[in-house]
Each structure stands twice: as C-alpha cells, then as structure tokens.
Amino acid sequence: MDWTAPARLILDGAALVANWRALAGMSGPAACGAAVKADGYGLGAVEVVRRLAAAGCRDLFVSNWGEARALSGCGLPVAVLHGVRGEDMALAASLPLARPVLSTADQVRCWSEAGGGVCDVMVDTGMNRLGIAPAEVAAGLLDGLAIDTLMSHLACADEDHPFNDRQRDVFAALAGRTAARRMSLANSAGIALGSDYAFDLTRPGLALYGGVPRGELGGVIRPVARIEAQVIQRRVVPAGDSVGYNATWTAARDSDVALVNLGYADGYWRGFSDRGRAFAGDAAVPVIGRVSMDLTALDITGVAVGQGDWIAFDADLPAAAAASGMSQYELLTGLGHRFDRIWQD
C-alpha cells in the first residue's frame, strides 16, 4: 500500500549538479570527484551518484565497504576511505571497482599479503587522524604497491590558518616519492583555498549538498535539501500560556500556533528551539518552544495555515547552522529515514 510520510525532503538535483560543476571549475585542470559517504551526506547516495555521474563525475569516496557495496551498480571507481580490515577482504574481492584507501602499516601488509591490487593511500600531513607518516613513505613502506591516488586531508581548510600551507607543503614534497598516479588534498573548503591545493584530484563533499564552508563559496553554492513538514494541528494559545516542554516560550498575546510533524528524531535538532525559522508560503514563521522528538511548534499568527498544509523549513545551511549551534555537516548527515525523499531535477 502506498503511503505518504508527513515529512519530506525536497531535493534539488539541478542544484546538486550545478554545485559539482562549479567546484569542478574551481578545481582547474584537476579532476573533481565527490564524497558520497554517509549515504550521500544524508540525501541518498544512489540518487546523488546517478546525477553526478551523468554530469561527468568519475571518482567517488565512501567511508566503508558497506557503503561501497550500495554503489556497486554505478559503474564508477569507489575509494573506501577507512581502508581495509581482514573482515572486509571477501567483500572487497567481490567489488572490482572499489579500492581501499590504506592508512596504516597493518593495512598495507594486509592488502599486500592478500594479493592486493590497485589501492589508494592516505598520508598524515599533520592532522594526526588517519594516514601513514611521510617518514614511512621514505622508509619504503609503499614500495611495490599499485597506487592510484596518494591523498591527505586538511585539518583547518575552513579557516585562514597557517596549518593549511604547512600541510600543503608536506604533501607536495611527496610528489614522485611513490608510484601513485595522482595526488589529492582538497575537500570543499580546500578547493576554495586556491589552485595550489588542487593537485590532480579534488574531493568535495559538503559544498555539493549546499554547505558553505568558506566565504569564497557564498553565492556560488546553491541549497540542495529543503525540509517540509505537514501541520497536524492549528490552535490558539492565550496570552500568558506557554508552549512545549519546560515552558520556554510564553505567548505575549493571543497567538495562533501550528504543530508540525517534525522533531529531533528526524534530525531537526533541539538547537532550533526558539531559534529556527520556517515558511508558510512566503511568510516567515518562527519556531517557538522546545523542539521535541516528533513535533515542532510555530507561531503562525496572522498567517493562513491549516491542518494538512505543508510548511517549509529554512534550506540555508549556514543560517541554520548559526541558529542551531550545529555544524552544517551534522544538519545534513543527521537527516532521518522518516522523510520521503523527493528529487526534483
């Protein structure tokens, strides 16, 4: 039986493609891939990849082998950023277009002893997260490996920080030190840092989906995801009465209030309590009171909204992040599975 959920994500496929093309243009002669981990940053990786592949994207990045398996029908190479464990080897062998991004000496040995094949390698240039040390490269750890892409990851690309140049220089010094066909450093924010960071391949993620990690991308990147939720109830709250848990909002006048099918179980976080913004048509309406697990209240005084109507929530990720105190990454990847995801191209 067909059923329509009372909350939905309206996903703009044309904006997704436009964002990738803009980032590809900013990447100069470097190829531009796409980070589609976390189920395409919460939007649905299969549908994201279908659109990006049609636009010309040829390099995909996921977190683990389960995510790679979900994209096995896309026909594109998929780099698995968390490398490979012994438990992954059987699945890895069954996915000929997927390759691990090796980041420890143990992973290098595991891959080599299993017969390996083409892989990528992550080098730690100072973030102290995943990656082998440049000294291990110099000591010959990667000798004999068939490496497609040597990569590293910027720690502070969303800031004007001296660490950016330091990491770039450490990475650039590795050119020609391995058999790698390509080098890759820049994420979305790294692309905005300029051509010195592009190397051979860029790996945008957040900006593909409407996030703006640096000011240079403002006005370039278009929103992709918009939450809409259906009104369950319209009610009048008398002056002096409160709304929601802990009575954080009190009506200063007799107020019309809408309760909508949306809450923190959907990824509309409590940080939006008394701070979020939605739209009934062209009219902006504020979130009032605490966001609860399944419900959010809006002050719709003077606005024509009734039971069953749809309310759109702010699609501007930087503005939503500032209002909620959550990062743009969290706002996207936290979007729950109770939404109907509706693509509009």
Image (cartoon, rainbow, N blue to C red):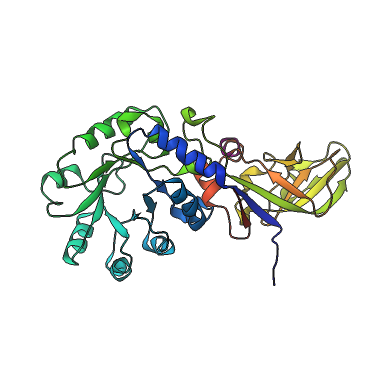
Q: What secondary structure prevails in the magenta region? A: helix
Up/down of 23 relative to 129, above or below: above
Where is residue 2 shown, x and y percent of the image? Answer: 69, 68
Name the side, left or right, on which 100 lies relative to 224: left
Count of marks placed on residues: 0
Nearer-the-camera pick, 292 or 192: 192
User: Does the segment drawn in magenta span residue 318?
Assistant: yes
- Kindly identify the residue that appears in the image at 50 percent across and 50 percent down: 51
**Residue 144 in picture, x, y percent from top left:** 12, 54
Q: Does 5 appear in magenta?
A: no
Q: Residue furthest left?
A: 139
Seen in the image, is 307 located left or right of residue 268? right
- Determine whether 105 is above or below 273 in the image: below
| Residue at position x 80%, y 55% in the image | 308
What residue is at 52 percent from the left and 30 percent from the top?
218
Along the horizontal axis of the image, is 162 left or right of 114?
Answer: right
Classify 318 as above or below 68: above
- Residue 70 can be seen in this image: yes
Relative image position of residue 145 (x, y in whole percent): 16, 55
Q: Nearer the viewer, residue 208 or 275?
A: 208
Task: Please identify the quadrant where the N terminus is shown.
Answer: bottom right
Residue 304 location, quadrant: top right
Does residue 88 appear left or right of residue 160 in this picture?
A: left
Residue 19 at x, y percent in the picture? 49, 39
The magenta-colored residue range is 317-321
Residue 207 appears in the rendering: no
Residue depicted at 18% across the width and 54% down the height: 146
